[in-house]
Amino acid sequence: YEPASPNVVAAAGLLAAVRELTADEIGHRLEHEKKLTEYLVHSMKNIHGIKLYLPPEKSHVGIIAFNLAGYKASDIGMILDEDYNIAVRTGYHCAPLVHEYLDDREYLGVVRASISMFTGFDDADALVRALGEI
């Protein structure tokens, strides 16, 4: 009694990715993402008006949720996209109840920046510069 079709394409993509990576490569990429996450969080803490929504440091890797005082999350996403060519996701992220806990109603959700193996420190610096200018 599935409500929709299984996501076969995503499962096949995950299988292909796992086949391409060795355990050492996965560990190396995870370490890169952890270092970049820490760097970005540290840099973002210096931005006036930023509000970060962070999990415990030991379990934090790859995603940074935030808001900027005076802006709706969707406005920040649009400005980053149109003026800085930076892609983020905004809103409630398919988890509306957690936003009651985050108490982010005035922002209409959060802005989410995601880090991957393709993200570099120059990308992190570009996001921080853009948010500082905004």
Image (cartoon, helix red, strand yellow):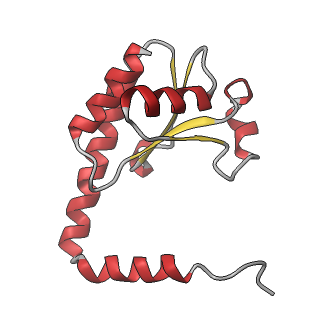
Q: Residue at x 23, y 75 (%)?
A: 23
| Residue 128: percent from left, percent from top | 34, 25
In this view of the protein, which residue sits in the foreground, 79 or 46? 79
**Quadrant of the image containing the C terminus:** top left
Q: Is 17 placed above or below 65 here?
A: below
| Residue 98 image-quadrant placement | top right
Q: Is 14 placed above or below 78 here?
A: below
Residue 52 visible? The answer is: no
**Quadrant of the image containing the N terminus:** bottom right
Q: Residue furthest bottom?
A: 1
Q: Residue at x 41, y 77 (%)?
A: 14
Residue 103 visible? The answer is: yes
| Residue 35: percent from left, percent from top | 26, 44
- Please state if 89 lies on the left or on the right of 29 as rendered: right
Q: Residue at x 29, y 83 (%)?
A: 19
- Please state if 129 lies on the left or on the right of 6 as rendered: left
Q: Is 1 placed above or below 87 here?
A: below
